[in-house]
Amino acid sequence: MTIVTLQIDGKIVGAREGDTVLHAARSAGVDIPALCHLEGLTDVGSCRLCLVEVGDGKPMTPACVTAVAEGLDVRTDTERLRFHRRTVVELMFAAGNHACAVCVANGDCELQDAAVAVGMDHVGFEYQHKPLTVDVSHELFGVDHNRCILCTRCVRVCDEIEGARTWGVSGRGADARVATDLDQPWGDSPTCTSCGKCVMACPTGALFHRGDTVSGIDHRRDRLASLIAAREHKPWPV
């Protein structure tokens, strides 16, 4: 195992070659906010919340998909980064319908936590949230597209951990939506195993258990983390 040395906010940090800047920073106790990242899943760098400044000229790059390198100089907390992170969160709130007071994930929502972390006390953009569908055709779960931030955690956990590949993304740009199988109602999906890992992985109230009330959802990410760890370390004999 090769260890490389880099600087994060002026602090010398050691990391394994192949690690990401996000992993190296968090291992060193430096918190970088992220929403599309979930430990154990492939990173896609879609939410842009974990932007950091790297190297000469300090271009901004998502920490979750940037590999560490010997001598890398990383800044995680500058005025420019704070501005961009707040802008990213504001745009998410402006794009969807994230009325926390009437959401099943109120109090257990990573988007809500991110808004608090970046100091967002209002949205400076015009709200776009056109009414989208709420699919409760599944006997156990529902999906509220109005609260989806397209982080694709559900897509990746369904593919990489459950192996069902039920979830995908349909449409492009502002019309993009998470979708089950060939964009059919979730309850009609022939591939869904009803495992609920997508609900555990969802950072907001977009995926929920049917019957959840306001502030009632428990994402149970500790259980998901143990499943991911078990998949990696294979503790059971076969």
Image (cartoon, grey):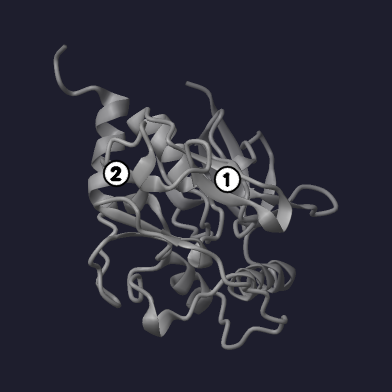
Q: Position of residue 174 (x, y in %)?
A: 70, 58
The residue furthest bottom is 121
Q: Quadrant of residue 104?
A: bottom left
Q: What residue sits right under mark 1 in the picture?
A: 64
Q: Nearer the viewer, mark 2 or mark 1?
A: 2
Q: Residue at x 66, y 67 (%)?
A: 88
**Amino acid type, callout 1:** Cys
Q: Position of residue 66 (x, y in %)?
A: 64, 40
Q: Nearer the viewer, residue 223 or 168?
A: 168
Q: Quadrant of residue 4?
A: top right
**Amino acid type, callout 2:** Ala
Q: Nearer the viewer, residue 164 or 44?
A: 164
Q: Is residue 225 left or right of residue 31?
A: left
Whole-Å distance between the Cαs marked 2 and 1? Answer: 18 Å
Q: What residue sits right under mark 2 in the picture?
A: 225
Label 1, residues with CA under 10 Å away: few <14, some 14-19, many ≥20: many
Q: Position of residue 113 (x, y in %)?
A: 44, 72
